[in-house]
Image (spheres, rainbow, N blue to C red):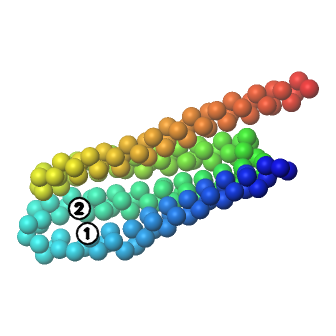
Amino acid sequence: MKNEPLKKGSTLSLRGAILALGAVVLFLCALPLPVIFRGDLGTDAEYKDIAYAFYVILTVLYAAAVPFFYALFQAWRLLGYIDKDKAFSLLSVAALKRIAICAGAVSALFAVSLPFFYVWAQRDDAPGLVVIGMFCTGAPLVVAVFAAVLQRLFKETIDIKTENDLTV
């Protein structure tokens, strides 16, 4: 009972972070991305030859938003399990597995877009664009590996707990 406010406070702050992250990505998908990519692509003669690269990158960004939001939903559910003292349950393991799969999907989608970042960087003589594309590929990959490791640890903990419950 003594740690109850601390536990609720930590999951509450994580829920706030999930909401903030989701709001930022939703805002980017709704307002600036269409404006940036719609802008002068059709009329600007300078970028007419690589307009396809912009459209592929935009398509990948929108496609990656779907597994991203599903992973946020799974993280929200995982925090609910923690609040209900079901952190070490098969439900948590399943949520972590889904988060890892979604993060891997986001990373794979961004990996597909890397050649188009290269085309854009070559055209603008901006090698930093390739680094941005690589970061967008690597960050979700780190999340996928971390979620997979946590999933395995939770599964082993559940197995040990079940074994101990059966011995007593």
Residue under the image location 13 percent in, 75 percent down = 43
In the image, is 17 to the left or to the right of 78?
A: left
Q: Position of residue 152 (x, y in %)?
A: 62, 33
Q: Which residue is mark 1?
A: 37
- Whether the residues at callouts 2 and 1 have beta carbons within 8 Å, the answer is yes
Residue drawn at x 16%, y 52% is 126
View extreme (top): residue: 167
The residue under the point 67% across, 36% down is 154
**Residue at mark 2:** 54
Q: Residues within 10 Å of mark 1 (few under 14, many from 20)?
A: some
Looking at the image, tell me whether mark 2 or mark 1 is earlier in sequence order: 1
At which x and y percent is residue 42?
A: 16, 73
Amino acid type of the residue tagged 1 in the rendering: Phe
Residue 49 position by quadrant: bottom left
In this picture, is 9 found above or below 135? below
Q: How many angstroms separate mark 2 from mark 1 (CA)?
A: 7 Å
Residue type at mark 2?
A: Phe
Quarter of the image that includes the C terminus: top right
